[in-house]
Amino acid sequence: MEKVSRFIVKRRNQIGILFVIMIIVSIMLIPTVKINYDLSEYVPNTEKAKQGLNIVKDEFGMQSFARVMLNDVTLVQAKEMKDQIAKIDGVDMVVWLDDSVDINRPEEFISEELLNDYYKDGSAIFEIMFEEDEYSSKTNKAVGEIQKIIPQNSNIIGSAVDTKSSQDTLANQITKIMVILVPVVIIILMLTTNSYLSSLLFMAVIGTSILLNMGTNIIFQHVSFVTYSIVAALQLAVSMDYSVFLLHEFEAEDKKDIIEAMVKSLSKSIISISSSALTTVAGFVALAFMDFTIGKDMGLVFAKGIVFSLLSVILFMPCLILKFYPMIEKSSHKSFLPNFDKFSKLMSRISYLLIAIVLLIAIPSYVAQKQNEFLYGSASFGGGEGTKVYEDEKAIVEKFGRSNPVIILVPTGDYLSEKAMGEEIENLEVVKKVQSFANSVAEGIPDSFVPIDSYQKLRTEKYSRFIIYLKTGAETTLAFDSVYKLEHIAEKYYGDSYEITGVIPITLDIKEVVNSDYNTVNLLSIGAVMIILLFTFKSVALPILLTVVIELRNIY
């Protein structure tokens, strides 16, 4: 490694200029990287809900939903607002009470059950369907227009709103994370190094690798919003120690000849830094083997980030240290941390006791780990606690309960089966409302007599569409059980010739795929890390020991 180190140190000025050019190019490229908010895109095409989603896109166009609650309004005022929302570009239909009854008649003549579904205590609830999916700019703009025209005390929720909320807050949240994280890291580095300037050099090196990683994401068709939102913080946290390794080696060298000191410290550091980086890269690359392909999206971006961190430390950091060495010396200070020799000796004396404690804690920790509950769908990121979306959902659910649409597609042509299936589904306690061609058009009326807009929303030459509103959340046991019930009913009438999709079925698919991916990713990452450690330490026992320690940490 000495020849490589000497070459790097000798060519440090050219390397420094190259990195500066790469930084400028990356900064210019970052705004052009496309961010994808559609989690359903990462679901395998072999999953039934994904197949149904693809058919819906082809046959009806991909649509999205929202719910709007107006407060302190009369039935007439609610009707006027409904008509305004229906005229907004991007809104396909608005479902409300007036679709079923004449709202101009006295309230006492309207079924109490029906009235309570759409109007209660001076509040009206609309079910809105947009022309395009929640990730389109047209839907995003339509949601913005709705938010503008509805009164301030109104509430609006739904997948389209979650997505808009995520898009609006993503950049702001990333900025907040970095504003908190960077000063904390700088303070920690100042406490653990012997120079105030060293911490700034560390941040410059890691900041460089982050910019290079984010700019080079242009090589991908798009990057998921999940990856984009955490990659900078994760890269900073995971790869910061590479810089510390190199600087500590440099500080231990005799500084009579700083060039030679850097060559020696770099020679000693490259293997350990590279080994650490490669094990991390292996763990991230293992994500690429997930069936839920967001793993590939995250794994490749994260692995690329670690490679850039490694290159930045090995190539760019020596350039910065040698360039600013006089200033590093001037800003040097005594270590703020105490000597840990006594602590190390104590840990060595009670090592067997510590091993026993760790193993004892591991068992309940492993059991507790299995009890963790996770969220998988869009509701988990667009309407978190503390957001307006969260408060709006709380208000709407409290007054009108939940309403999540599920779509079932069946072959067109059998009116009686459609009618019977629709009625059976409508009788389920968890179902709030069913929209279908069969329950909208009387038997025997020719298709040509049906208004073209109504026809196209619920039927094509190949498929009839059922839009089923469930009184459940998007990610609950009841929601998932309801999907299984709907599948059973559809299978009863159409065998395998049906498709089911929507937020809940897609979320259920994501959950099942991710759970099956867990063991695959875990085994691949463990195997890859052990192989790298085996070649690094040329020992069988040490890689096994280190892997066990890593896995124990994950359990806790």
Image: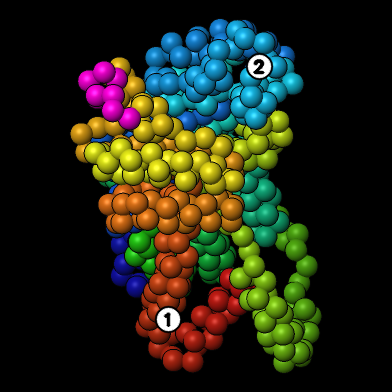
Q: Position of residue 487 (x, y in %)?
A: 41, 54
Q: Is residue 108 above or below residue 201?
A: above
At x 63%, y 19%, the residue is: 110
- Read off the residue under disc 2: 109
Alpha carbon distance from label 1 to label 2: 74 Å
188 to the left or right of 459: right
Q: Secondary structure at mark 2?
A: helix
Whole-percent x, y for residue 83 in the image: 50, 10
Asked if residue 31 is among those painted magenta in the image, a careful observer would answer no
* Amino acid at pointer 2: Phe
Q: Residue at x 75, y 63 (%)?
A: 337
State left or right for residue 339 relative to residue 24. right
Mark drawn on residue 530 = 1
- The kind of residue on which mark 1 rests is Met
Report crowding for label 2: few under 14, some 14 to 19, many 20 or more residues within 10 A (C-alpha): few
Q: Residue at x 67, y 11 (%)?
A: 106
Query: Relative to residue 146, is residue 185 drawn left or right?
Result: right
Toward the viewer: 332 or 45? 45
In the figure, residue 409 lies in which quadrant?
Answer: top left
Q: Which residues are magenta?
A: 443-450
